[in-house]
């Protein structure tokens, strides 16, 4: 676990530590605190606690071990400034992430059974809704549909202010 940890050095330092001062303490709590302080001072010299920054506590399920290994190699070659290998592993990471996302979402869809694949596919660009229901009337003229959308979005703010008593606003003059 610790690369440079030498058990003999730790034992030697513990033998050199003056634990006799613990016996001078009158209550058990202060004696325990003193022992803990002395013991940790030796341990921290030989095996210090390393603080590591964690970006996300919960990694997404689609982040596989294969992707993590590729990211480590990419980061290693970047730190060594080996740009040829770095570019190779950067591109490999991108492909692996894309592949794992596809696999993850494919499995999620197959396991859920509620959403259908055809519903998740985007509509073709030439497929535009040709009818719209507004105020219980159906409109099929594109000009009328556009005008209803325009009216809706230009009056929604005023409708919200008049219907919501908690919201008070002054109109800009």
Image (spheres, helix red, strand yellow):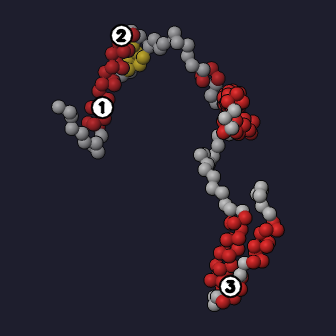
Picture quarter containing residue 167? top left
**Residue at position x 71%, y 70% in the image:** 42
Can residue 92 be seen by looking at this rendering? no
**Rendered view: 65 above or below 18:** above
Find numbered disc 2 in the image and state the secondary structure of the residue it sits on.
helix
Distance between the alpha carbons at the discs numbered 2 and 1: 23 Å
**Image quarter hosting the N terminus:** bottom right
Reading the image, the residue beneath label 1 is 157
Q: Position of residue 152 (x, y in %)?
A: 33, 24
Q: Which residue carries the number 2 mark?
A: 143
Tag 2–tag 1 contact (CB < 8 Å): no
In the foreground, 133 or 119: 119
Left or right? Give the position of 38 relative to 119. right
Q: Which residue is mark 3?
A: 22
Q: Nearer the viewer, residue 170 or 48?
A: 48
Q: Residues within 10 Å of mark 3 (few under 14, many from 20)?
A: some
First in residue order: circle 2 vs circle 1: 2
Up the image or down, 37 lies above or below 67; here it is: below
- Where residue 125 appears, as percent x and y from the top left, is 52, 12
Question: Marks 1 and 3, Cα distance to the nearest angstrom?
Answer: 73 Å
Is disc 2 surrounded by few (<14), some (14 to 19) or many (20+) residues within 10 Å? Answer: few
In the current view of this chain or complex, which residue is farthest to the left?
A: 173
Residue 83 rendering spot, x and y as whole percentages: 67, 30
Q: Quadrant of residue 173?
A: top left
Name the residue: 62% across, 28% down. Answer: 115
Q: Secondary structure at mark 1?
A: helix
Q: First in sequence: mark 1 or mark 3?
A: 3
Sequence-first tag of 2 and 3: 3
Secondary structure at badge 3 equals helix
């Amino acid at each position: 676990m610790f690369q440079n940890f030498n058990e003999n050095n730790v034992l030697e330092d513990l033998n050199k530590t003056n634990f006799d001062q613990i016996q001078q303490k009158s209550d058990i709590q202060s004696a325990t605190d003193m022992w803990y302080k002395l013991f940790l001072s030796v341990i921290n010299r030989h095996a210090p606690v390393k603080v590591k920054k964690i970006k996300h506590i919960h990694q997404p399920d689609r982040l596989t071990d294969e992707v993590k290994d590729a990211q480590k190699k990419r980061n290693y070659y970047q730190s060594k400034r080996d740009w040829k290998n770095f570019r190779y592993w950067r591109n490999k990471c991108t492909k692996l992430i894309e592949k794992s996302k596809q696999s993850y979402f494919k499995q999620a869809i197959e396991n859920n059974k509620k959403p259908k694949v055809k519903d998740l596919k985007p509509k073709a660009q030439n497929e535009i809704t040709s009818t719209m229901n507004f105020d219980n009337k159906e409109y099929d003229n594109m000009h009328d549909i556009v005008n209803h959308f325009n009216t809706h979005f230009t009056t929604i703010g005023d409708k919200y202010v008049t219907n919501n008593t908690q919201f008070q606003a002054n109109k800009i003059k």
